């Protein structure tokens, strides 16, 4: 087992993300006051972090593997409209709507993954095509089927409790889904043998294939996970707010990538951690929502968000470079 030391902590990919999170949390606690850390204030950024975090970790897995999926920007509203139209407009049972919606996520993930492994076209280009295709398809079908770009629905009581309710009238229930999935993903990446396959895939795909790792199946599975995660978030939002819109969800493309990068995942692949992405997601959510608790001019919100996130990323990179300059200690030293 790795010996606990300052040097070893600095080498951890989540160390910079943790310090960045602490920095922005302290900053907005000072300028936002007690309300920022009150249950209502914490809920404002935890709810954002939960919706984003469920998508960010699968995106982080893809980036560790050397791939990228930007079609999530279309999958969130597509899934939202899918269950909204099926259950709200046509009155199908909520359970059937959930199965079809998540099944649609599986289908898009399979399409992305199969095209990537069969054509060797960069995943950025493939998923960009899927992004526009799904967006256009959802808009077209929404107009044809409902003659509108927004629908309303009322989910079954059991679905409302499980997927779209507020705990203590404050925290969205999806926060608990996020925490549970984060624990599961941590086990997958850091404790199971499949995690080593993922790092191997991002380090050198050819060597990983030669070592017997099923790189093609793993790649397709990662795209399916990413797409289904986005579909799950879109579905939960419709059940929570009793409505769906075609235009919702595009911000998840950049927000998830920013959270992953702030969390210490390298764009070149082969390096990252679930805890780092978890911290990075919280950092982004705090910066995104913290401005509304301060007395700063709201017109400066984008500027402040950009500067704070840049500081967080630079902190992460600084600690990574420091760790690389520290020589490894031999066991027993």
Image (cartoon, rainbow, N blue to C red):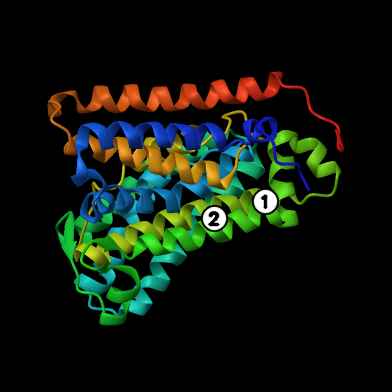
What count of labels does the image hold? 2
Residue 232 drawn at (x, y percent): 40, 61
Residue for point 47% across, 33% down = 19
Most foreground residue, 98 or 263 = 263
Tell me, yes or no, if residue 284 can be seen here: yes
Residue 206 percent coordinates (x, y): 79, 36
How many residues crowd around disc 1 within 10 Å: few (fewer than 14), some, or many (20 or more)? few
Nearest the viewer among 195 and 97 is 195
Looking at the rendered structure, the secondary structure element under dot 2 is helix
SS at mark 1 in the image:
helix
> What's the distance in space between the residues labelled 1 and 2, CA to CA?
20 Å
Percent x, y for residue 278?
A: 48, 46
84 lies above or below 72: below
Q: Is residue 9 left or right of residue 100?
A: right
Q: Of all residues shown, which one is farthest toward the front?
A: 333
Q: Is residue 99 above or below residue 151?
A: below
Q: Position of residue 72 (x, y in %)?
A: 41, 46
Instruction: Report crowding for label 2: few under 14, some 14 to 19, many 20 or more residues within 10 A (C-alpha).
Output: many
User: Image height check: is 77 above or below 298?
Assistant: below
Q: Nearer the viewer, mark 1 or mark 2?
A: 1
Q: Residue 216 versus residue 295: which sits nearer the camera?
A: 295
Q: Earlier in the sequence, mark 1 or mark 2?
A: 1
Residue closer to the observer: 231 or 267? 267
Q: Is residue 125 visible?
A: no
Q: Is residue 52 left or right of residue 14?
A: left
Q: Which mark is residue 190?
A: 1
Query: For the point 35% across and 33% down, which residue is it?
Result: 24
**Residue at 74% over, 48% down:** 197
Disc 2 target residue: 224
In the image: residue 56, left or right of residue 291: right
Asked where in the image residue 161 lies, by quadrant, the reply is bottom left
């Amino acid at each position: 087992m790795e010996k606990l030391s300052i040097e070893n902590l600095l080498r951890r990919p989540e160390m910079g993300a943790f310090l960045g999170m602490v920095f922005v949390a302290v900053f907005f606690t000072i300028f936002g006051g007690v309300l920022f850390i009150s249950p209502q204030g914490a809920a404002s950024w935890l709810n954002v972090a939960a919706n984003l975090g469920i998508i960010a970790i699968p995106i982080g897995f893809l980036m560790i593997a050397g791939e990228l999926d930007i079609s999530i920007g279309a999958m969130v509203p597509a899934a939202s409209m899918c269950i909204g139209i099926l259950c709200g407009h046509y009155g199908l049972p909520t359970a059937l709507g959930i199965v079809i919606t998540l099944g649609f996520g599986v289908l898009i993930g399979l399409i992305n993954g199969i095209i990537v492994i069969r054509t060797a076209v960069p995943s950025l280009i493939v998923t960009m095509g899927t992004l526009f295709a799904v967006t256009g398809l959802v808009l077209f079908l929404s107009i044809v089927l409902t003659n509108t770009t927004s629908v309303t629905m009322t989910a079954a009581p059991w679905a409302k409790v499980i997927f779209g309710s507020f705990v203590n009238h404050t925290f969205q229930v999806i926060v608990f889904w996020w925490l549970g999935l984060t624990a599961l993903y941590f086990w997958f990446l850091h404790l199971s043998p499949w995690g080593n396959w993922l790092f191997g895939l991002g380090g050198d795909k050819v060597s990983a294939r030669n070592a017997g790792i099923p790189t093609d199946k793993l790649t397709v599975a990662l795209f399916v996970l990413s797409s289904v995660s986005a579909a799950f978030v879109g579905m939960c939002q419709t059940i929570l707010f009793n409505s769906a819109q075609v235009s919702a969800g595009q911000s998840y493309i950049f927000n998830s990538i920013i959270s992953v990068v702030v969390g210490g995942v390298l764009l070149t692949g082969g390096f990252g951690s679930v805890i780092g992405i978890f911290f990075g997601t919280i950092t982004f959510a705090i910066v995104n929502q913290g401005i509304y608790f301060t007395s700063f001019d709201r017109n400066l919100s984008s500027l402040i968000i950009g500067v704070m996130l840049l500081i967080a990323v630079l902190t992460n990179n600084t600690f990574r470079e420091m760790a690389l300059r520290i020589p490894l200690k031999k066991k027993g030293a």
